[in-house]
Image (spheres, rainbow, N blue to C red):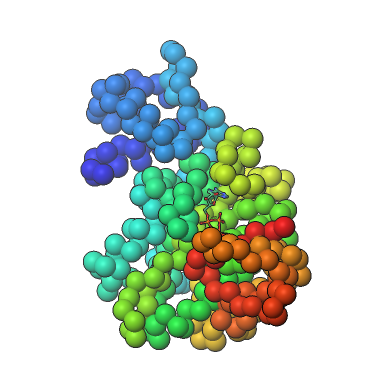
Amino acid sequence: MKHASKLIRQHILSLLSDGQFHSGEVIAQQVGLSRTAVAGHISQLSDWGLDVFKVKGKGYRLNRPFTLLDADKIKRHLPGNRLSTVQVASVLESTNTELKKKIANNRDELANGDTLFSEIQTAGRGRHGRQWLAPVGGSLTFSMYWSFPDGYQSMAGLSLMVGVAICEALRRMGIDDAQVKWPNDIYLGGKKLAGVLIEVEGQIGATAHSVIGIGLNVYVPAAQYDVGQPHTDLCSVLASEPDRNELAAHLVDSLHHHLNDFAAFGFGKFVPIWESLDLFADKTIVLQMGEKRFSGIDCGVDASGALLVETRDGIMRFHGGEVSLRGM
Ligand code: ATP
């Protein structure tokens, strides 16, 4: 995307976020474009998930105002001085993709805990190339970088530990009943609230560079958005809308803290807490691996993050990768 277009969309986004009417003519004057060009940018933002409408004679308005993410505000909520950085972009393809590009091109500039948020992802992803839907201003989509000098094997259980870290951050926002679904989802009230997508770059036997991507629903009403499975958002359970900058800071802080522990001790020490948060603990579950299906009882996880399932043939162990878990 051209730099000028980026700045124009950023400007339009920050103007509209106040929830007031803004005439196409005034916006056009401010950004030095024609009204038609402005209409084009707004239509593009709408395609990317901005909930905006137009009234003749009044201009454009959002259905719901929101506070823009702001790196300085997020940092102000962070305790202590961190060496890592927090950045906020307006529009990116995906924050994971962007950090992966950085690993490939400017790895020396990255430090553990560096975090990139984006108000808009034009191609947000879940596992196996599935789509992640995030209405503009109604969610948090971000990625954190962390390197593991001992390579891939020292990352076993990472996505589970990230789930624990997210639940801890949610507790700080007053939500103490979030749960984890093996291996990478966060649930609230039995519905999906957030997803984790971890991607890794690096050669076997060398440092593994991980990108920990998270999408979390703040205001994604089920009546308005169909994401293909039951989902929920924070606004459905909190008395008032959470401050996304404060929530972002809690997430960054909790992840940072948990990642330091994980890097030092591995997943083993997180097993009891993960199991206490397990959505399907002791329940009958179905595991889908390509064409194959297994069912059994969820018996928790081992120190490598593998899921333990009691089947007719005894306890079986499943590793993340291609496995998808469902309830019965
Ligand atoms: P698995 O159990 O294999 O992880 P999953 O359906 O949870 O399966 P993910 O890759 O974790 O898959 O997440 C992508 C899926 O999440 C999408 O296919 C869609 O069904 C769902 N999804 C997309 N956007 C959202 C959202 N904002 N909130 C909740 N769920 C979403």
| Residue drawn 48% across the image and 49% down it | 132
Please state the horizontal and vertical placement of residue 230, each as a whole percent of the image: 64, 47
Q: Residue furthest right?
A: 282
| Residue drawn 72% across the image and 57% down it | 328
| Residue 128 placement, left or right of 309 | left
| Residue 72, quarter of the rendered image | bottom left
Q: Nearer the viewer, residue 265 or 314?
A: 314
Q: Nearer the viewer, residue 212 or 35?
A: 212
Q: Nearer the viewer, residue 31 or 224?
A: 224
| Residue 328 placement, left or right of 114 | right
Which corner quadrant holds the N terminus?
top left
- 26 above or below 176? above
Res. 254 in view: no
| Residue 280, quarter of the rendered image | bottom right
Res. 192 in view: yes
Please state the horizontal and vertical placement of residue 264, each as a whole percent of the image: 51, 86
Q: Residue furthest top?
A: 57
| Residue drawn 54% across the image and 74% down it | 319
- 208 above or below 133? below
Please state the horizontal and vertical placement of residue 175, each as a whole percent of the image: 70, 58
How many numbered discs, if any? 0
| Residue drawn 76% across the image and 70% down it | 282
Please state the horizontal and vertical placement of residue 153, each as a whole percent of the image: 45, 83
